[in-house]
Image (tube, grey):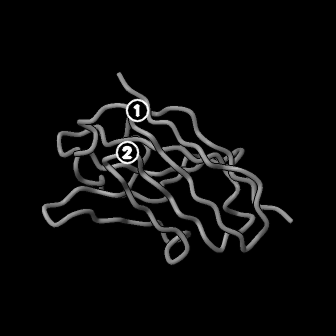
């Protein structure tokens, strides 16, 4: 069993930027899609973004709440996936974590990007957006 570890969180003012990192331990995971999720206190875990592997490269998907503000990228040579967050808002405050799809089509982002379709949950990183 493996776990993906998120890092890079911190305190940032509204309108600011952060880059989160997700490290995965095994080289074969470079063929897996990777999803980013967040969970605010008292709320359910929410899918934020996912980056899949396709024959032409990678394809990112974003939730409506972060579209045009967040960008996901990956560096398989470093076993890393990044979440670039710009224009941060107080409602982005949450613990962010990353995971890979459970299903046989592990290179694709599951439709709906639901946390129940992912595995490999490791330690998340807290992002606090506040003035």
Q: Quadrant of the C terminus?
A: bottom right
Tag 1 secondary structure: loop
**Residue drawn at 47 percent across, 67 percent down:** 71
Q: Quadrant of the N terminus?
A: top left
Q: Residues within 10 Å of mark 2 (few under 14, many from 20)?
A: few
User: In this orientation, which residue lies closer to the viewer: 77 or 111?
Assistant: 77
**Residue drawn at 47 percent across, 66 percent down:** 63
Residue ranking furthest to the top: 1
Image location (x, y in percent) of residue 96: 58, 47
93 lies left or right of 122: right
Residue 79 picture quarter: top left
**Residue drawn at 22 percent across, 49 percent down:** 107
User: In this orientation, which residue lies closer to the viewer: 56 or 44?
Assistant: 56
Residue 87 higher or lower than 48, as above or below: below
Image location (x, y in percent) of residue 6: 54, 42
Tag 2 secondary structure: helix
Query: Sequence order check: which comes first, mark 2 or mark 1?
Result: 2
User: In this orientation, which residue lies closer to the viewer: 25 or 36?
Assistant: 25
Image location (x, y in percent) of residue 37: 51, 50
**Residue drawn at 61 percent across, 71 percent down:** 86
Residue 83 higher or lower than 79, as above or below: below
How much space separates mark 2 and mark 1, taking CA atoms?
18 Å
- Which residue is denoted by mark 1 in the rendering? 120
Residue ranking furthest to the right: 131
Residue ranking furthest to the left: 55
Image location (x, y in percent) of residue 105: 18, 46
Residue 78, disc:
2
């Amino acid at each position: 069993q493996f776990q993906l570890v998120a890092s890079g969180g911190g305190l940032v003012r509204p309108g600011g930027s952060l880059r989160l990192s997700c490290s995965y331990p095994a080289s074969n995971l470079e063929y897996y899609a990777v999803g980013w999720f967040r969970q605010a206190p008292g709320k359910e875990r929410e899918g934020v973004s996912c980056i899949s592997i396709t024959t032409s490269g990678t394809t990112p998907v974003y939730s409506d709440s972060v579209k045009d503000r967040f960008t996901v990228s990956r560096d398989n040579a470093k076993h890393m996936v990044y979440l670039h967050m710009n224009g941060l808002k107080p409602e982005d405050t949450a613990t962010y974590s990353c995971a890979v799809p459970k299903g046989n089509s592990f290179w694709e982002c599951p439709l709906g990007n639901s946390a129940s379709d992912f595995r490999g949950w490791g330690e998340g990183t807290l992002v606090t957006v506040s003035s």
